[in-house]
Amino acid sequence: MRLKAVVGNWKLNGSLASNEALLKALLREVPREAPAACAVCVPSPYLAQAGQLLTGSGIGWGSQDVSRFDKGAYTGELAAGMVAEFGARYAIVGHSERRTLFGDTDAVVAEKYAAARRAKLTPIFCVGETLQEREQGLTEAVLARQVDALLDKCGVKELDGGIVAYEPVWAIGTGRTATSAQAQEAHAFIRGRVAAKDGKVAERLPILYGGSVKASNATELFSMPDVDGGLVGGASLVAEEFVAIWRAAVAQVEKGR
Ligand code: PEP
């Protein structure tokens, strides 16, 4: 069975006090041996706090980006090895906000994925089309371009250590969730693209859906055969909501898928 996971992306939100309250609330609900992975990707100054509160628990933590460089004269960058030193397991790369607001190209995202792997982190590689691209019938072409850039740079075997997140840009932070059929179609396409290189890697690859996931739509989305959980922005800041989304992934594992 493939890993099922629910990962929170806090984006640029939090404070020492509010993080502590949120993480303690999650710790009350998520057991050490959880059937579906649960993790939070925090702003990098809070990696140490996440490590202090979550070490030894069933909740993993990670960063929201990493540099493509391991070290050197790159002011403001965050090396994957530094993230790993704080006990983090995950690093998001290629989030659409990084791609659109901060200029991360497909090639840069692939380099960031490789940097995360060098540091033994599990990269969460985000892909997804804009509304305009969907309306122009370009969804598959965009996903193919984004996935191929990673396959070309890193090779398909490197996907064995990673997670993909399909995040249609039009669904992120908008309250407009993809239908379960739209998510399934995109996930199956991504898996097929990887399978064309290596069927076994594709079969093992967790593909999360992201874009306005809430407790009220998680069960339907996660019941799709190629949807292996969620990458959750806004709803990950509310403990009850995030736990309910994680429980929806647990329920799928308990159903045997
Ligand atoms: C995200 O930031 O990755 C995301 C999916 O955000 P939201 O859940 O708020 O749409």
Image (spheres, rainbow, N blue to C red):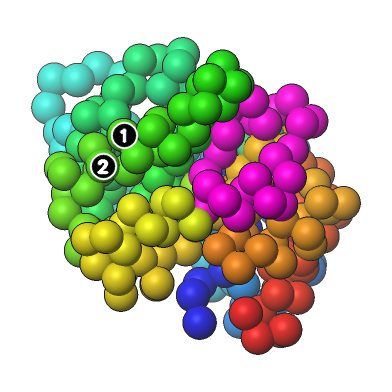
- Residues tagged 2 and 1 counted as in contact (Cβ below 8 A): yes
Indicate the amino acid at tag 2.
Answer: Asp
Q: Amino acid at mark 1?
A: Arg
Q: Position of residue 202 (x, y in %)?
A: 35, 66
Instruction: Report whether residue 180 is seen.
Output: yes
Q: Quadrant of residue 222?
A: bottom right
Regarding ligand 1, which quadrant of the image does it lie in? top right
- Between 126 and 85, the one nearer to me in the picture: 126
Instruction: Count neighbours of disc 1 (C-alpha within 10 A) and say few if under 14, some if 14 to 19, many if 20 or more.
Output: few
| Place of residue 237 in the rendered image (x, y in percent of width and height, measured from the top left) | 74, 40
Q: Residue furthest left?
A: 72
Up-down relation of residue 81 to residue 121 (above or below): above
Queried whether the magenta region covers residue 171, the answer comes back as yes
Determine if residue 22 is in view: no
Q: Residue at x 71, y 52 (%)?
A: 180
Residue range of the region highlighted in magenta in the rendering: 166-187
Q: Does the stretch in magenta take in 141? A: no
Q: Is residue 30 left or right of residue 60?
A: right
Q: Which residue is mark 1?
A: 145
Residue at image coords 77%, 31%: 176
Which residue does the numbered mark 2 point to in the structure image?
148
The local secondary structure at tag 1 comes to helix
Q: Position of residue 212 (x, y in %)?
A: 73, 38
Q: Quadrant of the C terminus?
A: bottom right
Residue 105, labelled with which disc?
none
In the image, residue 238 lies at what x, y percent? 81, 44
- Residue placed most toward the observer, 180 or 256: 180
Query: In the shown orientation, is residue 115 left or right of residue 83?
Result: left
Residue 33 lies, with reference to residue 168, above or below; the image says below
Label 2 Cα neighbours within 10 Å, binned few <14 / some 14-19 / many ≥20: some
Q: For this view, does 255 lie left or right of residue 56? A: right
At 24% from the left edge and 28% from the top edge, which residue is drawn? 108
